[in-house]
Image (spheres, helix red, strand yellow):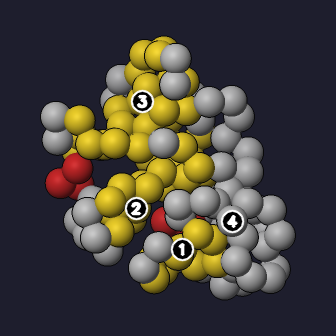
Amino acid sequence: MSADVTSAGCRVVLCAADDVQPGRMLRVVVPEAGPLLVANVDGTFHVTADTCTHAEASLSEGDLEGRRVVCPVHWAEFDLATGEALCFPATRALAVHPAAVEDGRVVAYIRGSHEG
């Protein structure tokens, strides 16, 4: 894992794109942002905070349903593209970080705190 600062934020290499197959998720912890969720939705990578804003659970242990991630504790749902909390009991959005695949690696651009 490596990081450098750009105008878009701190650029962090998270993993190899092949490490997260379509329909799968991966938890990656980075000093710049804390635990992050990398999700592959039909070849599009999304990077959000990995911690549910309601129950402090790891979302990577939940279910991926299309572009939604479902928390394994109380079934709160979040939109991976926007971070929006889609149902009770979660009411706060997740932090969402711009992501891209560069040279076969998933990178994210982190700005500010990892809190949602």
Q: Position of residue 69 (x, y in %)?
A: 54, 74
Could you tell which of marks 4 and 1 lies nearer the N-terminus?
A: 1
Q: Which residue is mark 4?
A: 84
Disc ID at residue 69: 1
Could you tell which of marks 3 and 1 lies nearer the N-terminus?
A: 3
Kindly indicate whether the residue at mark 3 contacts the one at mark 2 (C-beta within 8 angstroms): no
Q: Secondary structure at mark 2?
A: strand
Q: Position of residue 9 (x, y in %)?
A: 54, 24
Q: Secondary structure at mark 4?
A: loop
Q: Which residue is mark 2?
A: 39
Residue at coordinates 35% horizontally, 68% vertically from top-left?
41
Kindly indicate whether the residue at mark 1 contacts the one at mark 2 (C-beta within 8 angstroms): yes
Q: Nearer the viewer, residue 38 or 62?
A: 38
Residue at coordinates 54% horizontally, 43% vertically from top-left?
97
Q: Which residue is mark 3?
A: 12
Kindly indicate whether the residue at mark 4 contacts the one at mark 2 (C-beta within 8 angstroms): no
Could you tell which of marks 2 and 3 lies nearer the N-terminus?
A: 3
